[in-house]
């Protein structure tokens, strides 16, 4: 059971900006635990996209950015490209449930 | 090349057992904490179990507590998941993932390709 809520889907035209929200509670994001984001291309394993709320691992384009405020976090993709079509998951830590993932968001490039 | 390769998945009847393995290469396995994460068909990611670098600290998701056992052999660069009393709802792709630390952030930065477990009669 996911305790972090994400919109099921978001879409945008190439070049546009899209954002994905990740809403938690006072026992996870709101408790100060960090948020990480993963990208899962169709038929592949998840890949780390953002760690520590807003940090990009080496090799991740700067089109991807993350932020966190209160009990929520967001992932933004600017200059949307066809190759960004994938599922995106936020992940944090919950004081009672250990590691927790978001419900997942499918990004469609129109 | 840093790599994780899972194996051991397959078709098993409800109530049966399976042992998954995860072979690590390209990094000092004994220095890293590890997770098992699963994904049911068409569903999202679900954390399953955690083990510290030495194996002394272990955590489980409530959904598998008492049925699954995580372990590791640092001499063999391998992570394991013993799954007993399997249920249909355990059907999923099982991924092993390395936990890395930077500053005070802990995140899963390397993932295997996964191994598929199907529980069905």
Image (tube, rainbow, N blue to C red):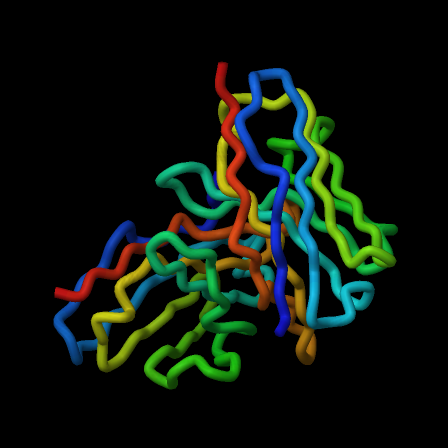
Note whether residue A58 is visible. Answer: yes
Residue A28 quadrant = bottom right
**Which residue is at the front of the view, B11 or A79?**
B11
Place of residue B16 in the rendered image (x, y in percent of width and height, measured from the top left): 64, 19
Residue B9 in the image: state x and y as whole percent.
58, 37
Q: Is residue B59 left or right of residue B92?
A: right
Q: Residue at x 44, y 52 (%)?
A: A102
Q: Is residue A33 visible?
A: no
Q: Residue at x 63, y 48 (%)?
A: B36
The quadrant in which the N terminus of chain B is found is bottom right
Which residue does the image show at 25% across and 54% down from the upper left?
A: A9
Find residue A45 and report its horizontal and vertical position in percent: 47, 56
The quadrant where residue A63 appears: bottom left
Going by the image, does B17 lie left or right of B117? right
Where is residue A47 shown, x and y percent of the image? 47, 65
Q: How many marks?
A: 0
User: Image quarter for residue A11?
Assistant: bottom left
**Horizontally, is B62 left or right of A103 in the view?**
right
Vertical arrangement, residue B19 with respect to residue A19, above or below: above
**Residue drawn at 39 percent across, 78 percent down:** A65
């Amino acid at each position: 059971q996911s305790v972090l809520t994400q919109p099921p889907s978001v879409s945008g035209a190439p070049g546009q900006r899209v954002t994905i929200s990740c809403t938690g509670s006072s026992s996870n994001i709101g408790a100060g635990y960090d948020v990480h984001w993963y990208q899962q291309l169709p038929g592949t394993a998840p890949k780390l996209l953002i760690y520590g709320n807003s940090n990009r691992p080496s090799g991740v384009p700067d089109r991807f950015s993350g932020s966190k405020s209160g009990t929520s976090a967001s992932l933004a993709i600017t200059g949307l490209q066809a190759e960004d079509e994938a599922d995106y998951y936020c992940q944090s830590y919950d004081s009672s449930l250990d590691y927790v993932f978001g419900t997942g968001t499918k990004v469609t490039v129109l | 090349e840093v790599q994780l390769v899972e194996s051991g998945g397959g078709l098993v009847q409800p109530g049966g057992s399976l042992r998954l393995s995860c072979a690590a290469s390209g990094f000092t396995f004994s220095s890293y904490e590890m997770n098992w994460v699963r994904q049911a068909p068409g569903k999202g990611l679900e954390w399953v179990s955690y083990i510290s670098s030495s194996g002394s600290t272990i955590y489980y998701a409530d959904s598998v507590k008492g049925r699954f056992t995580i372990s590791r052999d640092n001499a063999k660069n391998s992570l394991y998941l013993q799954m007993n009393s399997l249920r249909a709802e355990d059907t999923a792709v099982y991924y092993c993932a390395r936990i890395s630390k930077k500053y005070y952030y802990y995140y899963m930065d390397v993932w295997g390709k996964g191994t598929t477990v199907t529980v069905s009669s």
